[in-house]
Image (cartoon, rainbow, N blue to C red):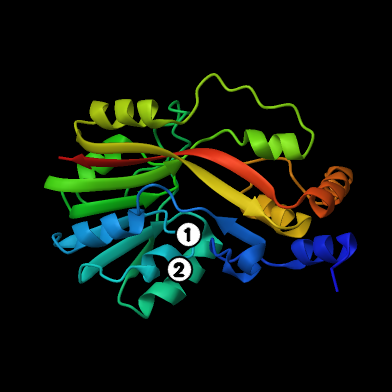
Amino acid sequence: MTPSLADLLDEAASRRIEGWDFSWLGERLSTRPLEWSFKSIVEERSRQAANLLDLSTGGGEWLASLEFRPKLTVATEGWPPNVLVAGARLRRIGVSVVWSEDAPDNVDREDHVRGRLPFRSASFALITNRHASFLAAEVSRVLSSGGVFLTQQVGSVYRDVYDALGLPRPLRRTEWDLALATQQIGAAGLRIVEAREGTLITEFADVGAFAWYLKAVPWAVPDFTIERYRLALERLDVQLRQSGPLRTHLRAFFLEAAK
């Protein structure tokens, strides 16, 4: 039997967020693969690195999924509930998790205090960052000579999400994109080795999956709550039942930089 709108939204409202694990949604939320495999790239570079630092690891799900990691691997996380979740998951595989305040959004460079890393200079041969903000100067400081920084990022403007909710698209003077990332990383003294761009396409089979996703990524629509947007979600539910899954697009890019 097809779940009702009330059932879908009640489930989304009551389901706790632990880490960044969306797997419980199964086929209700699917993401098309990008033109590159960040996981494969990190695994390959890990085999050549003495140690690894993963920035803003979330719940540690992605880091734990790697088939190979250097023996000395450390992760940082800034959200206290995720520190506990990641710690419990990663300790079992020999990875230490360190609390470190998240860096400010990369399009907001006025805050230079947050994002400092609690490690000595030139401590890590490989630093990874997947879909999280970072201070390029701190990455450069902590990276050892000849070390590598790998990051995969997605854009900062969720236009399709706003359209789905019937909201005016937000206006931002600066967008988080490959050009800005390249500029920041280069200014920090790192050399760009490879850069690629693509589109991250995500499909939501029902409005409950979409509502829970917006709870899990609060930067997409900062004032989102299920109750506040219930009328918009009701309209979207009718649309999805008639027309099929909601598809959203985000600009994505990958960068490899060396010191």
Query: Could you say which is closer to the camera, residue 56 or residue 236?
Result: 236
In primary-sequence order, the first of circles 1 and 2 is 1
**At 79% from the left edge and 34% from the top edge, which residue is drawn?**
166
Label 2 SS:
helix
Direction front: furthest residue: 243
Spatial separation of the CA atoms under disc 1 and disc 2: 7 Å
Query: Could you say which is closer to the camera, residue 74 or residue 47?
Result: 47
Direction top: furthest residue: 173
Q: Which quadrant, please, contains the N terminus?
A: bottom right
Q: Residue 148 appears at what percent x and percent y?
A: 19, 47
Can residue 51 be seen in the rendering of this structure? yes
Q: Residue 183 appears at what percent x and percent y?
A: 31, 25
Residue 256 located left or right of residue 3? left
**At 33% from the left edge and 38% from the top edge, which residue is drawn?**
196
**At 66% from the left edge and 37% from the top edge, which residue is drawn?**
160
* Label 2 environment density (alpha carbons within 10 Å; few <14, some 14–19, many ≥20): many
Can residue 143 be seen in the rendering of this structure? no
Q: Is disc 1 in contact with disc 2, using a CB cutoff of under 8 Å? A: yes
Q: Residue 213 appears at what percent x and percent y?
A: 66, 54
Amino acid carrying label 2: it is: Ala
Which residue position is annotated with label 1?
58
Is 38 drawn above or below residue 138 in the view shown? Answer: below
Which label is found at residue 86? 2
Amino acid carrying label 1: it is: Gly
**At 50% from the left edge and 26% from the top edge, which residue is drawn?**
175
Label 1 SS:
loop
Residue 130 located left or right of residue 68? right
Rendering quarter of residue 191: top left
Q: Which quadrant, please, contains the C terminus?
A: top left
Direction left: furthest residue: 145
Is 91 drawn above or below residue 207 in the view shown? Answer: below
